Amino acid sequence: MSIKVVIIENGPAIIQADEIIRINSGVPIPGLQERETVAICRCGRSKDKVWCDGSHKKEAVEDGI
């Protein structure tokens, strides 16, 4: 499996794989059974941790960034 991780400045870590991403037991990630790309929250503001829900964008606007 090939995996690519891209860190977005002031945003999430994007994980891309060439097949469905699975947890250590080999089971697809719950709720993401058919995903080859996921976004991991790095700001701690997501309401759906560990997944990015875009909360960093709203906070950046409120902070004037």
Image: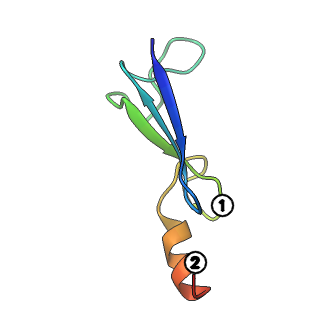
Quadrant placement of the C terminus: bottom right
Which residue was labeled with disc 1?
43
Quarter where residue 24 is shown: top right
Report, in whole angstroms, how far the alpha carbon at label 1 lies from the one at label 2: 10 Å
- In the figure, 30 relative to 22: above or below? below
Q: Amino acid at mark 2?
A: Glu
Q: Amino acid at mark 1?
A: Cys
Q: Residue at x 58, y 12 (%)?
A: 25
55 w.r.t. 15: above or below: below
Q: Quadrant of residue 48?
A: bottom right
Residue 1 visible from this viewpoint = yes
Left or right of residue 47, residue 54 in this image: left
* Residue at far left of view: 34
Indicate which disc, 1 or 2, sits on the residue closer to the N terminus.
Answer: 1
Residue at coordinates 46% horizontally, 32% vertically from top-left?
30
User: What percent of the width, then of the height, locates residue 54?
Assistant: 47, 63
The residue at 59%/63% (across/down) is 10
On the image, numbered disc 2 is attached to which residue?
59
**Residue at 64% in and 53% down:** 42
Kindly check if marks 1 and 2 are in contact, taking CB atoms under 8 A apart as contact. yes
Q: Circle 1 sits in a helix, a strand or a loop, which is it?
A: loop
Q: Position of residue 3 (x, y in %)?
A: 48, 22
**Image height check: is 27 above or below 55?**
above
User: Would you call the spot at circle 1 few (<14 residues within 10 Å), some (14-19), or many (20 or more)?
Assistant: some
Q: Residues within 10 Å of mark 2 (few under 14, many from 20)?
A: few
Q: Is residue 46 above or below residue 15?
A: below
Across and down, in percent, residue 1 comes to 45, 11
Number of marks in picture: 2
Q: Secondary structure at mark 2?
A: helix
Asked if residue 32 can be seen in this view, the reply is no
Q: Closer to the camera, 10 or 47? A: 10
